[in-house]
Image (cartoon, helix red, strand yellow):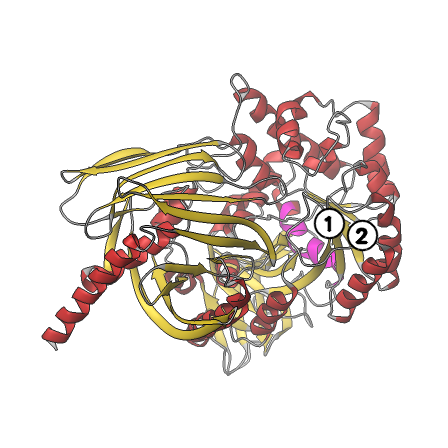
Amino acid sequence: MKKLTLLLFCLLVSFAQISFSQAEGGKSRYTFILSGNKAGYESSTRNPDGSLQLHFEFNDRGRGPSVNEKIVAGKDGIPVEIEITGVDYMKAPVVERFSLKQGNATWKNRSEEGEKKLTGKAFYSSISGASEETGLLANALLAAPGHKLPLLPEGEASIEKRSEIKISANSQSRTVVQYAINGLGFAPAPLWLGQDGKFFASVSSWSSIVEEGWEGTLAELLKEQNKFDNQRSGSLARSLAHKPKGPLVFVHDNLFDSEAAKMVPNQTVVITGNRITAVGADGQVAVPKNAETVDAAGKTLMPGLWDMHVHVSPGDGLLHMACGVTSVRDLANDTDALLQMRRRFDERAEIGPRVVMAGFIDGRGPYQGPTKVFADSEEEARAAIDNYAKLGYVQIKVYSSLKPELLPKIVEMAHAHGMRVSGHVPSGINAEQFVRDGVDEIQHMNFIFLNFMPQVKDTRTPARFTEVAAHGAELDLKSGQVQAFVQLLKDRKIVLDPTLSIFEGMLDDRPGKMAAGYAPVADFMPAQVRRGFLYGGLEVPDGMDQRFQDSFQRMLDMAKVLYDNGIPIVAGTDSLAGFSLHRELELYEKAGIPSAKVLQLATLGAARVVKRDAELGSITPGKLADMILIDGNPAAHVSDIRRVKTVVKDGVVFQVADLDHALGVQPVH
C-alpha cells in the first residue's frame, strides 16, 4: 500500500508539471459561454522565459473583464510570481501582483496587500485571474499530501476526484476527469481536467468555459456534474431535515402578526403535517398529547421571509433556508435548470425555498441580456409568453434591449394569461412611459432615478449605474416632476423592487474596506467568500467619493417617499442568496420605514403581490407551515433578522446551525 501511495504521489506530481508545460510550443484557447451564448474567450501561450501568459475576456451587457495574466511557476507547479493587469467586470482597472521569494510571500491587489513567511507550500488565489489558474490549483492539490493546501491570503483548499467520462466532438474523442475543489466557496467547486492534467472546462447552467472546439459537450459535462451535486444535496436533505412524527407546537413565543404588522406575546402555534392548525394565547390552545413541543420563550416566531428578486443557482437553496428565506421569486434563469431545481426543492430532494417564476424576454443586440429567449417581433413574444404560461410562470420580466414598441403588446398578451409584467425599463423610453404602457412593477431603484436623467441616452450600458452614482444626489424629491411621477405610480398601483443592497455595494463600498452589508457576518464566512466582501464597488473618480455616498442616500430617501405615498415595495436582492436579504431589510429601516412594516412587506406583502397570500405570508390556521424562529425581536430591531435559529418549511424543521455547518459558515451568534 505504501509503495502504491508513493507511486500515485509521483504520478500526480508529474501531472502538475505536465499541466504547466502543456502549452509549451503552442497555444490553448477556450470559449466562454454565458447563458447558452458565446460571450468571450481565454487564451494561453508560453513566453520565451518559460512563464505562462493568459488572456481572459467576455462581454455581459457592456460589462465584463479583460485581463492579461502572467504566471511563473516553480517545479512543483505552484505559482511563485503572478502579475495581472486589465479591467474587471465593471471596467475598473486591475493591477494585481503576487511574489514568493525565499519563503516570503507578498501580494497586492485592488482590496488586499500583505505578506507572510511560509513554513510550507501554499497557493495564492488571485481575485482577478483567468480560469486556467484554477487548473494549476487543482494539480497542486492533487500533488499535495492529503490533497490539501493552505491558500493565500487565507483559507485552505482540498480536492477530490469525482468521475471520468469519454466525450466526442468534431469527430474526435477524449477522456476528461471531473474533480471538485473544496474551500473556494459555500460548496465544492467542480472542474474538468484532461487525462494529462491540463485544464479543460468549468461548467454551470449560467456560465461555462471550455476548451475551444468542445462547446458541444457542455450539456454532457453538466449532466455528469449534476449527478454528484444532486447526490450531495440529497444527502444533506435527508440528514438535516426533521419531519415531526406528530403535531409540532411552538409555545410561549412572541408571534409576529404580519396582517396587523405587530408583535403578539405569549402565543401557541400548532402545526399538523404541513399546515398550521391552531394559533392563540398560551393556555387557550390545546396542545395535542403526541405533539413535539418547542419552548420559544423570549424568541420571535414569524412567517418565512420572501426574496422577490433572485436568480437561483446550484447551492442557493441551502443559503436561502439558512437565512430564513422560505420563498423566492426567480426573475430570470435557464428554464430547464430552474424547473429542475424547483422540482427538487418541492420534492424535498434538496433543501431550498418555494420558487415562483418570472419568464425573461429581451431583444437581440450588443447589450442583450444573458438569456436564450429573445423577442424582436410580436410572433416571437407570443411564443415565449405562451410557453412560459404553459410551464407555470406567473410573471414576465422584460429587459433593456427589448424594442419599446413591443412592450404594450407583451403586456396585453401576458395579462391575457393572468401574468404580471415587470422588468428593466427598455432603452429608448423612461420609467414614466414604461408605466403608461401597462406594466405592473419596476425592478431596481436606478430606473426610477434615470426617469429624471434624459441625458442618459442608452440605459443598456454601465451608464445606468455610473450616471446615477454621479448625479443621483442632485434629484430634488420635492420637485413637481418627482411628485407627479410618484402620483402616477400610485394611480397605476405600480410595485417597486428597489434592490437597494446592490446599489449600496456599488456606491458605498470601497476597496479594502469591509462591505457594510456583510460586516456583521463576514468573519463567520468561509475565508475565500470573506475576501469578496472587501473588493469594493464602482470605480470612484477623483473628488466624487462623497457624491457617490450622497447619491445612495438619495436612493434611501426615495424609498421612504414611495413608501409614504403608498407605493408597494417588495424586498428583493439580486445578490448573494439569503444574507443579502437581511441587509435589504436593514436598509428599508435605515430609510425610515418602521421595522414592523419592513417585516410585513417581506412576508405577507410579497405573498400578496404574487397572489400566494391565501396559503402563505402569515401564521394563520389553514395556511402552509412556513415560519422562522428568531432569537430576538426584529419588529423592534430589524437587524435581529440575522439571528434565525429554526426554519420550518412545509412542516419540515431545519436547525440553522446545521445548515450553516454544511455551508462552511460558523454560527453567527
What's the CA distance linking mark 2 and mark 1?
7 Å
- Relative placement, left or right, of 583 versus 531 is right
Label 2 crowding class (10 Å Cα cut-off): few <14, some 14-19, many 20+?
Answer: some
> Bounds of the magenta span?
598-611
Image quadrant where residue 637 sits:
top right
Residue at the front extreme? 25
Give me the residue at 82% from left, 29% from top.
483
Pointers 2 and 1 in contact (C-beta within 8 Å): yes
The answer to whether 115 is drawn above or below residue 381 in the figure is above
In the rendered image, residue 226, in percent from the top left (x then y), is placed at: 48, 71
Q: Which mark is residue 364?
A: 1
* Residue 241 visible (yes or no): no
| Residue farthest toward the left in the current orientation of the protein | 2
Q: Main secondary structure of the magenta part?
A: helix
Q: x and y percent of residue 22 in the render?
A: 31, 56
Q: Mark 1 falls on what kind of element?
A: loop
- Identify which amino acid the numbered label 2 is placed on: Asp
In the rendered structure, find residue 93 and report the number of the disc placed on it. Answer: none
Question: Percent x, y for residue 286?
Answer: 59, 76
User: Which residue is the site of mark 2?
Assistant: 376
Residue 327, horizontal then vertical, whole percent: 62, 61
The amino acid type, in three-letter code, at marker 1 is Arg
Is 626 positioned to the left or the right of 51 in the image? right
Packing grade of label 1 (10 A; few <14, some 14-19, many >=20) is some
